[in-house]
Amino acid sequence: MKKTITEILQDYTGGKSGLEETNQALREAESGFSLKPGKNALTEEEIRATTIGYYPDMANGFGLLDTGTGTLDKVRVERGRLTDCDCGNMPALVTLAGRTYEVRGRVLADRSAG
């Protein structure tokens, strides 16, 4: 069974799959993008330094931001907030440490939360 793009990114940010394996899976899923070292690929140190908890405000570290533009941006999260960008009212998702959150402005929220 083919994985969804979200599942592929969750495996990558959670440290379950490496960069080459992830890019191959993204090609097979016809995502139209790939992860590039120095641009939007996470280093092993960044993946290992990233932590999440039960609540979104417990997330810290590095993730991949999807704003619907067809590319992903590497972002830093501290206490459940994006540190270097604000998505305003634009729909966005961030995946880090194997979990995907909605982004409301700069704040991470559970995808199921209203």
Image (cartoon, grey):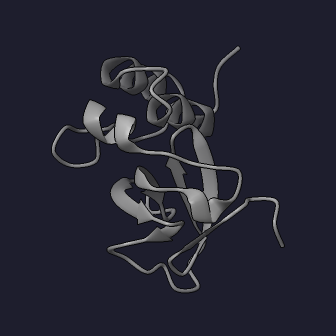
- Point out residue 24 in the picture as x, y percentages from the top left corner: 40, 20
**Can residue 38 be seen from the camera position used here?**
yes
Residue at (45% x, 58% y) in the render = 65
Where's residue 79, x and y in %? 50, 66
Q: Which residue lies furthest to the bottom in this view?
A: 88
- Indicate whether 101 appears above or below 104: above
Q: Which residue is drawn at 42% across and 51% down?
A: 64
Q: Indicate the quadrant containing the N terminus: top left, top right, bottom left or bottom right.
A: top right
Residue 57 position (above or below residue 44): below
- Tell me if 20 is positioned left or right of 12 in this view: left
Number of labelled discs? 0
- In the image, 104 versus 55, the foreground residue is 55
Q: Can residue 43 be seen in this view?
A: no
Q: Look at the picture and state if 70 lies above or below 104.
A: above
Q: Outermost residue, top direction?
A: 1
Residue 38 placement, left or right of 105 = left
**Residue at point 37%, 76% (across, down):** 85
